[in-house]
Amino acid sequence: MDSALVKEIGTKALLIGAAGLLVFWTVNAIKLVIGARGINPLVKKFFNQIAEGRIDAAYLLTSKNYRQHVTRQDFLKFLAGLQLNRYRNLKSGRPRIEDKEIILTLKLKSEDKQSELPLDFTFKKIEDNWRIDRIVKV
């Protein structure tokens, strides 16, 4: 009888632990989705500005911190080095939250899908608006 009681308590504890983990994961997933609202339009706007040749407008979508560390000339050199005109499709990865920033890996794919350019974008919320705080070629 003692082993049956221990087994029953162990099963209940396991179920309670699994339920707690599921609630924790769900709450964090909801927080991420709600908190990340506005990032996809920003990414679309950023790449549209570049495609239209409005590099200064794309540069202004970055944070003040980014512009303090990356001059306009450096930004132009970085974009030229990426050769963005070779890529047509954009695939977004799963966002990650780190210290009130959201890091999103975007993969640019060529039209023939032979080559891929992964970029890590770090977004920071500044006065209720998302801004690009860092762009790193992975």
Image (cartoon, rainbow, N blue to C red):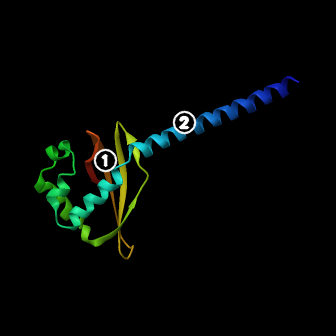
Q: What's the residue at 48%, 39% (across, down)?
A: 28
Q: Which residue lies furthest to the front in this view?
A: 128
In percent of width and height, residue 99 lies at 35, 36
Work out whether residue 134 can be spotted: yes
In percent of width and height, residue 8 lies at 79, 29
In the displayed structure image, the side of residue 34 where residue 11 appears, left or right? right
Q: What's the residue at 12%, 54% (across, down)?
A: 72
In percent of width and height, residue 132 lies at 26, 49
Q: Residue furthest bottom?
A: 112
Classify the position of the C terminus by image quarter: bottom left
Query: Which residue was labeled with disc 2?
Result: 24
In the displayed structure image, the side of residue 112 where residue 11 appears, left or right? right
3D distance between C-alphas at marks 1 and 2: 24 Å
Q: What's the residue at 29%, 42% (across, down)?
A: 124
> Which label's residue is closer to the chain start, 1 or 2?
2
State whether residue 74 is above or below residue 50: above
Quick one: 136 or 89, which is closer to the camera?
A: 89
In percent of width and height, residue 129 lies at 28, 44
Decide: few, some or many residues near mark 2? Use Cα within 10 Å; few <14, some 14-19, many ≥20: few
Per the image, label 2 sits on a secondary structure element best described as: helix
Per the image, label 1 sits on a secondary structure element best described as: strand
Q: Quadrant of residue 43?
A: bottom left
Classify the position of the N terminus by image quarter: top right
Quick one: 59 or 2, which is closer to the camera?
A: 59
Work out whether residue 138 can be spotted: no
Q: In which quarter of the image is residue 42?
A: bottom left
State whether residue 91 is above or below residue 95: below
Q: What's the residue at 75%, 33% (across, down)?
A: 11
Query: Which residue was labeled with disc 1?
Result: 122
Q: Which amino acid does label 2 sit on?
A: Phe
Decide: few, some or many residues near mark 1? Use Cα within 10 Å; few <14, some 14-19, many ≥20: many
Q: Which amino acid does label 1 sit on?
A: Thr
